[in-house]
Image (spheres, rainbow, N blue to C red):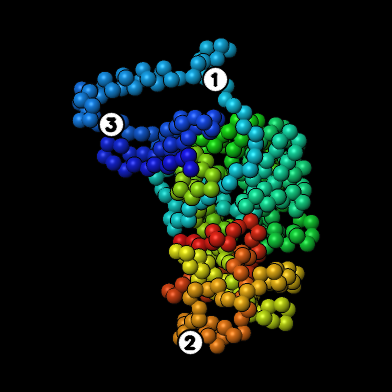
Amino acid sequence: AGKMHIVMQGQKLKGEWILVKEKRDPESNKWLLIKAGESMKPLSAKLDDTSAISGRSVAAITKANDAQWQSNRPAATTKTGARLAKKKRIEPQFIEPMNCKAVTKLPEDGKWTFEIKFDGYRCLAVKNVTEVTLFSRNENVLNKRFPNVVEALRAVRGEFALDGEIVALDEQGRPSFQLLQNSRSRPLEVFFYAFDLLNDNGEDLQQLPIDQRRAALQRLLRTPKDPLRISPLLEAPPGQVLDAVSKLGLEGVVGKRDGSLYEPGERSGAWIKQRTNRAQEFVVGGYVPGARGFDSLLLGLYETGRFLFVAKVKDGFVPRVREEISRDFKKLRSDTCPFTNLPEKKSARRGEAITAEKMKECRWVKPKLVCQVSFVEWTDAGNLRHTTFVGMRTDKEASEIVRDV
């Protein structure tokens, strides 16, 4: 795909690199080798050591490589006598968001920065001249839902592509996905928390280290006014950060490795997340009918290509949401149960088991709808206990939903 992410843990070579194909010229076969993370440790070979492959000394190889690099170097501009040729302009556009890898413990090696994990809609904000477009993670346009964010971004000078999160805050100032979900039916004050700058006036910043991208973000937004905000860095040891976030009732912590580049659509581990609450996304595969459309939803997720039933949820719904979900069921009806692990045995350790007899009462739908659910714990059998519906997730693809480990 034009990119390779390499991590080496050897005695002589230890570090992280990214090999990226140059995109400015589609016909070019040039590649860039970019160092990420901590500085590379020097090779232990001496300058007079001899290569077993070429028979030349390391010093001779280095000298030849330097000469070749200098001959291939782009000519310097006449303006400064030292700068490289001006980069080709790349219009700000939608970029698939970089993802976080779930972890159970934050690293303590001092090579990470930490931020709040916001409970909202991931959003790519793109401005070209005066046109602003808010994209969800699956490229749906959110402008009509959040006009106040659009207007605020239109007032920012320049053209850019920002990565951030659209968030609604409750009375205690905490992000609330339920409030954000309810903004469909009534106007609601929302905020855009920016945490990355991917394009600045036609300059692609994705291959810059994260600290440089963040500095450019600060220069672009300066001291932003609501509803625009910059996601704050949490300046404390990881244990204290997690403890404070947990006590405040926030969703979790995001960690970003120092020097990490932006990897669209990837979950490489350069960005990580640790939740403090027990909640995640699930896919609706069916429902139990009830007086108000349905009594409960049947939820599942994907594991090694199989769609597995994990829980029923019947609490947390408001009438409007029940009506919206019930309307979606009409378009997704199916005669076939999508869950590969049903029916259950009567002895299943999870409330009322979905036995073959119970399945006769269920109605099935194609697994397309994604919702967020909070719960107390996972059972040893892989089911959820004490579930509560939080909201529908139109910004997530069903095929991406797996268990957060």
Disc 3 marks a residue whose amino acid type is Leu
Q: Mark 2 or mark 1, which is nearer to you?
A: 1
**Closer to the camera, 69 or 223?**
69
Give the spatial CA distance, label 2 vs label 1: 71 Å
Q: Is 15 situated left or right of 179 in this image?
A: left
Q: Secondary structure at mark 2?
A: loop
Residue drawn at x 73%, y 46% is 149
**How far apart, in angstroms, are the residues tagged by discs 2 and 3?**
62 Å
Can residue 246 be seen from the camera position used here?
no
Name which residue lies at 31% across and 19% down.
63
Q: Amino acid at mark 1?
A: Ala
**Residue with the mark numbered 2:** 346
Position in image of residue 116 (x %, y %): 57, 51
Residue reaching furthest to the right: 186
Residue at image mark 3:
43
Report the mark closest to the observer, 3 or 1: 1
